[in-house]
Amino acid sequence: MKTKIIDGKSIGEDIRSNLSARVQSLMDQGHRPPSLSVVLVGDDPASQVYVNHKEQACGKVGIISRSYRLPASTSEADVLAVVKDLNADPDVDGILVQLPLPAHMNKFTIINAIDPLKDVDGLTPYNQGLLAWNLPGHRPCTPAGILRLIRSRETDLTGKRAVVVGRSILVGLPVATLLTHAGATVTTVHSKTTHPQSIAKEAEILVVAAGVPGLVDQDWVKEGSIVIDVGIHRTPNGLVGDVQFDQVFETVTAITPVPGGVGPMTIAMLLSNCLDAYGHRARTSA
Ligand code: NAD
């Protein structure tokens, strides 16, 4: 009997141990290890923590990670030069530019400069286009992790009524596309939607990525639904999500906690994309 809590930590650990075995097998066959390069511009404290977590996670599965920590005053041209060098480096399999970038930089210009084959965050227009086409490519990590969490409770999403709160290129939009390709009927609500709670309340699957602490209470949640809380906020009382967990817990069939839900899956999917990038490059350069 499954508990109501969808344990992203444990599901993520299963994925990581599988990846670890695959990396070990590559090493046993005398191949070089996969590698990830992370570019961090500025000193946003949350980004520093995320990058540290990503580096540690790489180390645990045997992926080599290198970080390029640049001051916030770095010019866009200099960041583009770093990305260009990483694109050309045959020992680099994955490139990730940590967001947010400082305000003086054009996020699209920088992300668009990443070689799509090395774009393990799945954010380049090319990979987002492959996602729209439902063709193989690097899927954005958080959305791909969310789908895994949903599928851990509901394997067949055909005809399911899903609502996604948020329409960002990082989370909301790609989650809606993945759910649509999986056969769900999807509505996206966002900051300009009138009465989003009444729409959310129709959802059998509710994904909340609004970036507003505690936004979703029981008025938003349908009886028996699956709720995925993507939000993550540091408060004096610890980390909280976009969903008022205690308030909706009795109503739902399954729900992700914060922390321990979506966050660990994001990192697991990043590692998985790195290994896919490595495999693809090894096959095409053979
Ligand atoms: P974002 O700010 O880019 O987008 C937020 C979206 O929510 C927007 O589309 C906006 O229209 C919508 N929104 C805002 N207020 C709303 C409201 N009151 N009602 C309905 N919609 C509303 O944020 P994002 O990058 O998509 O991230 C969302 C949250 O997820 C943040 O808390 C972020 O920290 C978290 N996040 C977590 C992970 C993870 O791995 N756990 C990864 C990425 C993002």
Image (cartoon, rainbow, N blue to C red):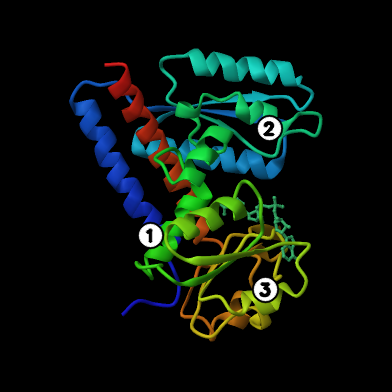
Mark 3 crowdedness (10 Å alpha carbons): few <14, some 14-19, many ≥20:
many
Inspect the image, locate mark 2, and give the three-letter code of the amino acid beneath it. Phe
Q: Residue furthest front?
A: 133
- Residue 276's disc is none
Label 3 sits on what residue type? Val
Q: Quadrant of the C terminus?
A: top left
Horizontal placement of 106 versus 177: left or right?
Answer: right
Residue at horizontal 68 percent and vertical 79 percent from the top: 198
x then y, percent, for residue 214 = 70, 70
Q: Compare marks 3 and 1 and give the one earlier in the sequence.
A: 1
Q: Secondary structure at mark 2?
A: helix
Residue receiving disc 1: 10
Q: Secondary structure at mark 1?
A: helix
> Does 7 appear above or below 86?
below
Mark number, residue 216: 3
Q: Mark 1 and mark 2 in contact? Answer it, CB < 8 Å.
A: no
Q: Give amino acid for label 1.
A: Ser
Residue 51's place in the image compared with 191, above or below, is above
Left or right: 185, with 101 as reference point:
left
Residue bearing mark 2? 108
Question: Which residue is located at x 55 percent, y 13 percent?
Answer: 85
Q: Is residue 230 visible?
A: yes
